[in-house]
Amino acid sequence: MPELIAPTARLHDSWLAARDDWGRGVHQDGSGLRPGDDVDTPDGFAAFVRKLLRESDPAVPPVPGWVHCTYWWMAEGDEVLGTIALRHELNDFLLEAGGHIGYGVRPSARRRGLASWALAGVLPYAKNLGLDRVLVTCNEANEASRRTIERTGGVLEDVRDTEIGRVRRYWIAVAGDQQLSSMPSATGKSTLT
């Protein structure tokens, strides 16, 4: 059974296998991977994981131009299947194109409902942040992501041309009765219900 877990250096090999499934240099929504991140060496990967965990900490100021963001990995046992990120607020770019939530499922793990499951799973955390709705976007041509967002309650606001291409912008209401049963810790794992 898949779980949402906090990023951990323990899954370095599995994370690399997922990255290679995407293809090196391919953008992976929700992963937090940026050009210049060293993820191939154990020390570099450990620094990358620390960076992801630090970005969620409200006590640590975000990098200028960025916002606080919490990352989870979709994992089954020790296999990383995908990633999902919840940005705690919107800056101009995120309001225009990026949204509150980004996610990606590695190609070999698609068509299992993981994206819908993960997207629904982070909504209680958004509620705990005080958000009453979240913006989720997808490339206009990404039919699978469109279906995922709509299945999770996304209401289309518009389709617009942005600096990352033509995107569909959806709002998902964070229901008042959604509750966070547990959260992954920096070293542990938990399912979200």
Image: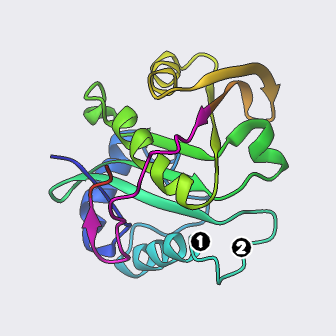
Callout 1–callout 2 Cβ contact below 8 Å: yes
Q: Would residue 7 be found to the left or right of residue 168 on screen?
A: left
- Identify which residue is drawn at 27% across, 73% down: 188
Q: Main secondary structure of the magenta part?
A: loop
Q: Is residue 74 visible?
A: yes
Which of pointers 1 and 2 lies earlier in the amino acid sequence?
1
Q: Is residue 51 above or below residue 35?
A: below
Q: Mark 2 highlights which residue?
A: 62
Number of other residues with Cα within 10 Å of mark 1, as a class: few under 14, some 14 to 19, many 20 or more? many
Q: Quadrant of residue 57?
A: bottom right
Q: Does the stretch in magenta take in 152? A: no
| Residues in magenta, as a range | 172-190
Number of other residues with Cα within 10 Å of mark 2, as a class: few under 14, some 14 to 19, many 20 or more? some
Element marked by disc 1: helix
Element marked by disc 2: loop
Choose between 137 and 36: the one closer to the eye: 137
Q: Is residue 5 above or below residue 48?
A: above
* Amino acid at the residue labelled 1: Glu
Q: CA distance from mark 1 to mark 2?
A: 6 Å
- Identify which residue is drawn at 74% across, 63% down: 66
Where in the figure is residue 94, as x and y percent of width and height? 74, 46
Choose between 25 and 118: the one closer to the eye: 118
